């Protein structure tokens, strides 16, 4: 466990000491939170559009923020692989599970801290603009979004392992755009219906925001919270297994 | 006692033979230089000895452990400073050293004690709180070697340790390497003649994946029929290149 913690600590420091990570993982999502709150103020109530209402927006921005943690995971892993840092580490007693856990743990902590700050900002905004968000709902939603964070981090780990330092961030950017769109961060698929809703329901991102938004309203219904959360948990577990196996097989190939 | 032994060690990449039937014995406490031009197979040899590559055929042993079958045991007794410095850029010098010590499983007190000792031994005090990304090439190399030494390895692999350094930084690093002589077995790859000449107990000249000559400086000079290593190297290389052409790099 010492090795995992040492490597996790190194990764945490590498990310938190890069100013770009604050711009992308914190400043940008918070800026979007404020901008979309202003957009929401301009939308007539009769339109029935609630996706930018602060309780919905908070969850959307939290999931959107997690995708940037995915980007930095992909960047860190691909950068380590492209240089000789991992070569040096391969010559130490570290094993593949030490590496994958060492990448996963600090990213999860960073994602949780990021989501907490986004939710605190949302709470303040909700007190100003109304309707006020229930702090207990925020806390439950924060926990509900943990599997979603794991899922995004594992996508970053997978891309960072499989692709180069140049390709991995590009592919992560595609996932950022795709997940924020079909994850219903910027529009309400349930009101749109049709093919768009079908596409959203095929991918796991929709269920991340759906479970988080239900949790913030303390709505623990089977369709609204339990099943979406279960889908995200299963996807996160599958991606954790796949990314760990892929890292292990790449490491094996590197050492062959 | 031999600390490193290779028996017909061979590594092929497709049709290319990077290391060809290498049989070597390196004694405990010896500083052994692998001297050769780019592509001679020096780094591939180091990679196989440090369990980073598997041989296509043949065997390598470090401290009596097989590099193929007992890589865990080998990794516990070696330290590696790769050709690129391979340090964590956003970590300070101290943090890099503490990180490496923790990777070897030492407790907090041991990590601190080892880090303090290596900082003192390598005179890293003036840059100890500086992030690695801000260090000059010479300091980075020193840090890289210090990181490889944090676990008190029995065998230290230095892959082109002074590549790209200016003459002053190179001499400074030579002094640090000289201090290590006799304390552990050191395998150093280089294509700088004066480096091999200055530091090594024995030198092996690698040409196209094979050992063309091995021995003390005097033995190499005699074999090359020259009075300096560069002339001896050229003579040995020219005599062997034709022999090796065809199957090798």
Image: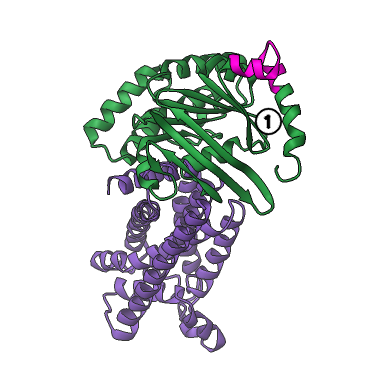
Q: Main secondary structure of the magenta part?
A: helix
Say if the magenta span includes residue B223: yes
- Between residue A185 and residue B112, name the one nearer to us: B112
Q: Which residue is located at x 74 percent, y 33 percent?
A: B241
Inspect this view and state whether residue A34 appears.
no
In this view, the residue farthest toward the top is: B227
- Give above or below for B246 relative to B155: below
Q: Which residue is located at x 47 percent, y 29 percent?
A: B26
The magenta-colored residue range is B218-233
Please state the horizontal and vertical placement of residue A97, each as a whole percent of the image.
36, 56
Residue B27 picture quarter: top left
Chain label for disc 1: B
In the figure, the shade used to draw chain B is green
Say if the magenta span includes residue B103: no
- Between residue A86 and residue B25, name the one nearer to us: B25
Inspect this view and state whether residue B85 appears.
yes
Please state the horizontal and vertical placement of residue B240, each as a whole percent of the image.
72, 31
- Please give the residue where the numbered disc 1 appears in the rendered image: B37
Chain depicted in purple: A
Q: Secondary structure at mark 1?
A: loop
């Amino acid at each position: 466990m010492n090795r995992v913690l040492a490597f996790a600590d190194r990764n945490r420091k590498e990310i938190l000491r890069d100013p770009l990570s604050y711009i992308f993982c914190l400043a940008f999502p918070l800026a979007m939170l404020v901008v979309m709150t202003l957009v929401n103020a301009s939308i007539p109530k009769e339109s029935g559009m609630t996706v930018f209402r602060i309780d919905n927006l908070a969850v959307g921005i939290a999931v959107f923020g997690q995708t940037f943690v995915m980007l930095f995971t992909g960047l860190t892993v691909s950068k380590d692989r492209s240089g000789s840092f991992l070569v040096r580490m391969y010559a130490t007693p570290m094993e593949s599970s030490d590496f994958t856990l060492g990448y996963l743990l600090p990213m999860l902590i960073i994602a949780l801290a990021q989501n907490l700050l986004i939710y605190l900002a949302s709470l303040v905004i909700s007190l100003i603009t109304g309707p006020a968000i229930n702090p207990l709902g925020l806390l439950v939603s924060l926990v509900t979004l943990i599997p979603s964070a794991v899922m995004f981090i594992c996508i970053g780990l997978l891309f960072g392992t499989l692709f180069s330092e140049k390709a991995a961030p590009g592919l992560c950017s595609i996932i950022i755009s795709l997940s924020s769109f079909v994850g219903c961060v910027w529009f309400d698929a349930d009101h749109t219906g049709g093919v768009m809703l079908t596409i959203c329901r095929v991918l796991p991102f929709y269920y991340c925001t759906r479970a988080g938004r239900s949790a913030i309203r303390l709505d623990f219904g089977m369709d609204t919270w339990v099943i979406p959360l279960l889908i995200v948990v299963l996807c996160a577990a599958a991606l954790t297994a796949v990314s760990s196996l892929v890292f292990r097989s790449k490491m094996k190939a590197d050492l062959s | 006692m031999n600390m490193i032994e290779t028996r017909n060690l061979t590594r092929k990449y497709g049709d290319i033979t990077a290391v060809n039937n290498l049989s070597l014995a390196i004694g405990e406490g010896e500083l052994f230089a692998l001297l050769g031009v780019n592509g001679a197979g020096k780094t591939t040899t180091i990679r196989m000895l440090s369990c980073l590559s598997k041989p296509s055929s043949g065997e390598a042993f470090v401290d009596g452990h097989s590099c193929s079958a007992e890589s865990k045991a080998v990794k516990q007794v070696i330290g590696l400073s790769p050709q690129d410095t391979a340090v964590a850029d956003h970590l300070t010098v101290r943090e890099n050293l503490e990180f490496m010590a923790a990777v070897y499983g030492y407790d907090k007190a041991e990590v601190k004690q080892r880090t303090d000792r290596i900082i003192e031994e390598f005179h890293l005090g003036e840059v100890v709180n500086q992030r690695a990304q801000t260090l000059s090439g010479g300091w980075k190399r020193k840090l890289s070697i210090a990181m490889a030494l944090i676990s008190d390895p029995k065998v230290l692999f230095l892959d082109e340790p002074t590549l790209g350094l200016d003459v002053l930084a190179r001499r400074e690093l030579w002094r640090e390497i000289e201090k290590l002589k006799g304390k552990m077995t050191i395998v150093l790859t280089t294509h700088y003649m004066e480096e091999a000449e200055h530091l090594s107990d024995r030198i092996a000249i690698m040409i196209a994946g094979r050992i063309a000559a091995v021995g003390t400086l005097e033995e190499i000079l005699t074999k090359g029929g020259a009075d300096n290593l560069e002339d001896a190297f050229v003579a040995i290389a020219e005599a062997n290149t034709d022999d090796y052409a065809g199957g090798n790099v």
